[in-house]
Amino acid sequence: MDLYSIGEMVIDFTPGSEPFSYIRNAGGAPANVAFAVVKNGLEAGMCCSVGDDDFGRFLYDTIRENGVRCIREGLCGEAVTTMAFVTLFPDGDRRFTFARKPGADMFLRESDVRESDIQESVIVHAGSCSLSASPAAEATAKALRLGHEMGKIVSFDVNYRDVMWGGDAAACAGKVFEVLPYVDFLKISDEEVEMMGGEAHIPSLMENFGLTVVVQTLGPDGARCYYSGRTFDSPAEKCVCVDATAAGDAFWGGFLSSLRLQGVEKPGDVTEEKIRRALLYGNAAGGLCVQKKGAIAALPTREQVEAKLSAAVL
């Protein structure tokens, strides 16, 4: 596999074609990144364990129908994971309400994470939401640690949400710091950077934890990259990294895909030129996702991204 992803999933009820009708979409950062990688022509597997009910079966089927290999076969017989309900108001605004069943975290156990799956992969990816409760937190940490020990590229997306942490930013940051020693590529938004100490602390953060690349998404201003003592920006069109439309996940899936398409197989293969190309690729993917206003269905394909980049060059 090019990508092994582990983490929580979300149900996103997005507006349908009729007024006040809704389409049920599976989402969530680790899943969306896996879907984005598949749409860019790479192979991805997701470590997934969902409830044996209508929502759980929907999540499970959506993974497979979108071409992502589901590494954990079968359903766990417990409540489904976090759900996000969206209301479409007459003015077109989309407002989210989160509902969370007790103990609804993916139900992953450490035993769900198999060394053979990680050994088969090039990149191991997870997000901070999956660290929000045990036992999923232990399973996620194990996957990242094994990936690091095996010399794989370890990717991590800081994805802070009140629904996951009850507004406790310190608890979220503390859990993230626990796994950072295993991480090579870190994606973090400008708001989340402040939660972890601010931009001035990023160089020391990289040195202390051995991070190879830190990419800070800047909403309408694109992305900022920290690499090898240098900092450089990659401009983007408006709202390219708005997570509510999965654009941030499209951005990161495109970024990782571009690195793999450029032959990156281990952290040492990274160069500034390859990172810059990956940032442009990710920005194009995020921009296309925003234009379609959706989640999984809006994640662009490799052909769409490359056509957008070609048009920009011309």
Image (cartoon, rainbow, N blue to C red):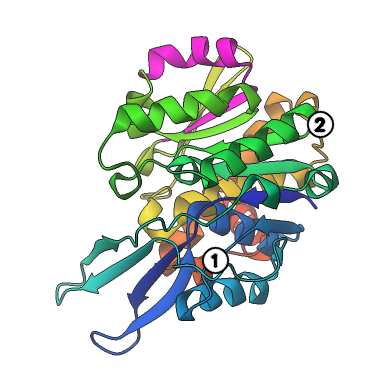
Q: Nearer the viewer, residue 271 or 187?
A: 187
* As drawn, 6 above or below 224: below
The picture places residue 137, in percent across and down from the top left corner, at: 52, 41
Helix or strand or loop: what does disc 2 sit on? loop
Question: Can see residue 305?
Answer: no
Task: State the count of labels.
Answer: 2
Helix or strand or loop: what does disc 1 sit on? loop
Considering only order in the chain, which callout, 1 or 2, is on the residue closer to the N terminus? 1
| Image-based side of 118 in relation to 301, left or right | right
Q: Residue at x 49, y 78 (%)?
A: 53
Q: Nearer the viewer, residue 203 or 163?
A: 163
Q: Which mark is residue 24?
A: none
* As drawn, 41 above or below 129: below
* As drawn, 250 above or below 185: below
Q: Residue at x 65, y 26 (%)?
A: 182
The picture places residue 115, in percent across and down from the top left corner, at: 80, 43
Q: Label 2: few (<14), some or many (≥20) within 10 Å? A: few
Amino acid type of the residue that numbered disc 1 sits on in the rendered structure: Val
The picture places residue 117, in percent across and down from the top left corner, at: 80, 50
CA distance for labels 2 and 1: 28 Å
The residue most toward the left is: 90
Residue where numbered disc 2 is placed: 150
Residue 200 part of the magenta-drawn span: yes
Look at discs 2 and 1 and give the one toward the viewer.
Answer: 1
Magenta-highlighted residues:
198-217
The picture places residue 185, in percent across and down from the top left corner, at: 62, 31
Residue 186 part of the magenta-drawn span: no
Amino acid type of the residue that numbered disc 2 sits on in the rendered structure: Met
| Image-based side of 202 in relation to 264, left or right | left
Q: Which mark is residue 50?
A: 1
